[in-house]
Image: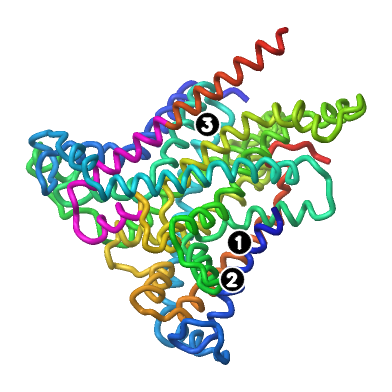
Amino acid sequence: MKMSRSARIALTLYGVLAILFLYLPIISVGFASVSKARYLTFPIKRYATKWYGKAIESSTVQDLLWTSLSVALLVTVISMVVGFFGALAFARYQWRFRGVFQKLILLPIFFPQAVLGLALLLWFNALGIIPTWKTAVVAHLVWISPIATLIIAIRAYSFDPSLEEAARDMGASTWIVMKEITGPLLWPGVVSAGLFAFLLSWGNFPLSLFTTGADSTLPEWLYAKMVSGYSPLVPSVGILSIVTSIVLLLSGVIVMWFIRARSETSNAR
Amino acid sequence: MGVVLLISFLAPLLVIAVFSVMPQKVFSLLHLPDFSSYKLVFTQGYIKSVVWSFGMALASTVMLFVICWPLAFGMAKVFKGFGLFITIAVVVTLFVSENIRLFGWVLTLMKGGLIEGHLRAWTGLTFEGALYNVPVIVFGLVYAYFPFMLFPLIQGIAMVPDDARQAAADLGASRWQIFYEVDLPLSAPGIVIGSLLSFVLAAGAMAESKLLGGQTVIVIADEIETAFTYGQNWPLGSALSIILILIIGALSIFGINRVNLDLIMGGRRS
């Protein structure tokens, strides 16, 4: 159905507005992070990068970075593995409880995270486990590994099951099929799931709040400072955390790009 | 995988359920059950928080649907390269901690913030900041859950065949009729998932009302946190959680059951 030119332009404008709406607060934080004054007011009169220096030197911030990074890395690795097999069960293999499994996987995503965090805290308490950043890894996994599963499942839906059957008919064992056919086909999905897992864990607040115990992650610290009195470090630490995400995102995109380039050359051969 | 979910997701829920029938202010599960927490919930005005949470969640979901529909339509049917650009731009915001983005709105909307500060500097006009009221909390919810409505809607609208819209138009259907009789029913799975996600997430949200709303309204998630931390009353917090879980769980199961998951994720109709 053809759309009139003016409607098309109006829609495009609407899209631009939506993007601006999404980025306006991040821009505000960016400006605030380079304001020299201790008590922020707009318009900013003098700019300075001293809060970044203070943030990087601060040992609290370094500890927070380290905790957040450890949690996110562990969550990434585990949810890539779990997501890979979960996705096969979700999308590829016909088995008896697949319908139930598909719905069960979705439930943690639909669940309010703060309550999930609390439920886990009580559960750890009942088991006699003292919460540290390691328990936060478990909490993040309950929420993030289903998301990783879904992302890989989307990839699994898009490839032709007859490829696996053909390999099996030619006498390939289950392990060979997994290594030569399923693995390489799902690999881009696994990488993007890993990327999502890292970034979602890195920015997560409601789950960490209840499950890190005495340890603290970056988003938790930021929230505590936001609620109880402004610290001029908040905007700059916030921007540092965003920059980390962007760097990782870009490197992920480059890795994906390499994988695609390599598989194209091997197809050409 | 199923076993992992069982011990890390279902077991904790069971613990909360058992805690919710323990007597007040105990910290172990080894007591005779009573229902004093639930009595407290219904007599001490906690229901008001429940109503606020779900009311604001409903308002934000309806607004999100209206705001996201044109954009989702554009991205599913009209835009080409620009659609990909918007997708990436929206996904990137998801990777910035929700706290930081909401804090950004505080900086934008507060008195002396980005908007009011510049307005005063340029025109001399001024207004009290736009923070600390109910509409700004709903605004925050709309902002935070925008992607959760947008992407399912795009998936849903992409499932509407162009032929069906074209046929309706050829038979003389008006724009509104096409929307109401073709687009809406055929994209229903996307609408259900999107509305469910944003409603459920908004109902359990806490940061919006705390950061943007100050103490104007106390939402249910906030009450739960207070009961566990300052209140030191785990059974009360558990009872409140169970009420939230029951409502959200019922809605989610109802919604998920109406949608063919294989189909919406790009699988073939079997």
Query: Are both tags, 3 and 2, on one chain?
Result: yes
Q: Which residue is mark 3?
A: B74
* Residue at which label 1 appears: B8
Nearer-N-terminus badge (3/2): 3
Residue B145 visible at all:
yes
- Give the magenta range: A220-247
Callout 1 amino acid = Ser
CA distance separating discs 1 and 3:
40 Å
Tell me which residue sits at (43%, 40%) in the image: B95
Please identify the residue farthest to the top as the structure is shown: A269
Q: CA distance from mark 3 to mark 2?
A: 36 Å
Vertical order, B119 against B256 (above or below): above
Is residue A229 part of the magenta span, yes or no?
Answer: yes
Instruction: Say if residue A11 shows up in the picture.
Output: no
State yes or no: discs 3 and 2 in contact (Cβ < 8 Å): no
Residue at 43% over, 32% down: A248
Mark 2 highlights which residue? B246
What is the image's colouring? rainbow
Q: Which mark is residue B70?
A: none
- Camera-side residue: A244 or B36? A244
Q: Quadrant of residue B9?
A: bottom right
Question: Front-most of A200 and B261?
Answer: A200
Query: Sequence order check: which comes first, mark 2 or mark 1?
Result: 1
Q: Position of residue A40 (x, y in %)?
A: 14, 46
* Quadrant (top left/top right/bottom left/bottom right) for the C terminus of chain B: top right
Q: Residues within 10 Å of mark 2 (few under 14, many from 20)?
A: few
Q: Is residue B220 left or right of residue A226?
A: right
In the rendered structure, which amino acid carries the disc numbered 2?
Leu
Q: Is residue B165 above or below residue A257?
A: below
